[in-house]
Image (cartoon, rainbow, N blue to C red):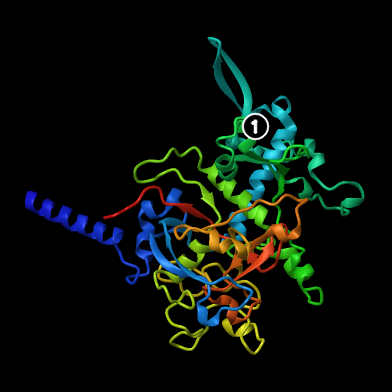
Amino acid sequence: MRKSYLRGFIATAIFLSSIITVSHAQSRWVRVKKNKVYSPHNRDMASIPAGQTFIGLPVEIMDTLRAPGRMVSISAFFMDRTEISNEQYREFVHWVRDSVAITMLGPTVAPNLFKPVSTTKGGATLTSQRQINWKNRKLLWRNGSKGYADKLANMYYTGDDALLGKKEIDIRKIRYSFIFINMDLAAAGRNDPNKNRRDFIQSYVDNPDPSKANEFPSIKVYPDTLAWKVDYGYSENDPMVKDYFNNPAFNDFPVVGVTWEQANAYCMWLTRKYAGNRGSRKQPKLEFRLPTVAEFEYAAKAGEQDAKYPWDGDLLNGDKGHLLANFKNDAGIYTPDYGLFPVNVRSYSPNNFGLYNMSGNVSEWTATAYNPSSVGLLNDFNPNFTYAAKPTDSKYLKRKVVKGGSWKDIAYFLQNSVSTYEFQDQPRSYIGFRCVASYPGTNIK
């Protein structure tokens, strides 16, 4: 019995070791998603191993508008296996909506929606009701004497803005405020005797002070569904404006109409959502963010340095002749891939890292600011260039790199090495995003 137990333990250890050390050329990594180490906070994330790859266009197809490619090394990180879906993003919208409403009511009007918090100061224990009691949030919109819906008239469209017979939330009031330490500012001012910690804190607030360089307007979180009309004025897209984000039929489709600023705010909220998890040896505490251009391209190639597309081979068709992504083909036709607009985030086959739609479906925001002149200054490990432009900055400072190509793009933009850009405050019907989190530590087994 003891020998049998020992043999079983050794076999298990060998199996786990084979998962940790799986090489880039081996299986599709789908098998590791059940291991909590590879699924942070039970999110469906792939574990991207550290490695190196050639980033950017090769010399033979480079043009004067793009900087030359280069070999870089990338640290290990976690990456969402799919683009953020409407359902996932709607959770963020509802959380902000409810927090705005609860704060508007206050603990005097809605004591059940707050929980007491005790602090010790000067030897005395003080109790306040500042923290929101999220367990009772269902009471917020319930009609009747026990609910608070009748006390939230300011949350709805009123007067000439309201439609007769409809009670609709005023989406202009759903804004997200947050603060964080800007490491770039901290590094630049670390030896300045005139700088304090507050000089490195970047904040997004409802009423920013123009005299404070690090204060930005709070982020409106509701997607701009009118992007479907703005992007394509001479097209019958009214159904997409009305239904794409709100209809449950589109729950598992990628969220679009979100700006780079909104995508960043979502990452901040996601980190905050799991802030109560202090982490452990197997489940470390993580901070979520947008991927850098280098991380995105490296993950798309899935360990193959010269991969043209995220899938194996340089063709757009699979073994049975079907297309491998959602895009506009060279004949200008949208539907041979079975999708006219975006499709389910789990459509088509994942790449060898288990990532879906790294090309096609929707293009994706990255954390990287677009500036071709910065390429020569970047390091050859974890390269990135960032800049958070203020509303008053030139539009050229608001450009952010977009990767992957989308349902409306031709095949050229689906190539791993190709990048485009969009302005950080511009929502588009063909741009979404996914989150990453840096892998803490280095696994050298």
- Percent coordinates x, y for residue 23 in the rendering: 31, 66
Query: As displayed, is residue 246 above or below residue 330?
Result: above
Q: For label 1, count other residues whose C-alpha is less than 10 Å away and answer few (under 14), some (14-19) or many (20+).
A: many
Name the quadrant containing residue 113: top right
Dividing the picture into quadrants, the one containing residue 176 is: top right
Observer-nearest of 236 and 53: 53
Give the residue type at disc 1: Leu
Residue at image x 53%, y 75%? 57
Percent coordinates x, y for residue 265 in the rendering: 63, 49
| Quadrant where the image shows the C terminus | bottom left
**In this rendering, would 267 be left or right of 166?**
left
In depth, the one of 220 and 421 nearer the eye is 421
Residue furthest toward the top?
123
Residue 419: percent from left, percent from top: 59, 70
Is residue 254 among what the camera can see?
no
Q: Indicate whether 130 appears above or below 154.
A: above
Is label 1 in a helix, a strand or a loop? helix
Query: Residue 371's quadrant in the figure?
Result: bottom right
The residue positioned 65% from the left and 74% from the top of the image is 341
Taking 135 as reference, is 434 above or below it? Answer: below
* Front-most of residues 112 and 401: 401
Q: Is residue 108 visible?
A: yes
Q: Residue 237 in the image: state x and y as whole percent.
A: 76, 72
Image side of residue 402 versus residue 243, left or right: left
Q: Give the side of residue 347 with respect to residue 206, left or right.
A: left
| Residue displayed at 72% across by 29% down | 106
Which residue is the site of mark 1? 113
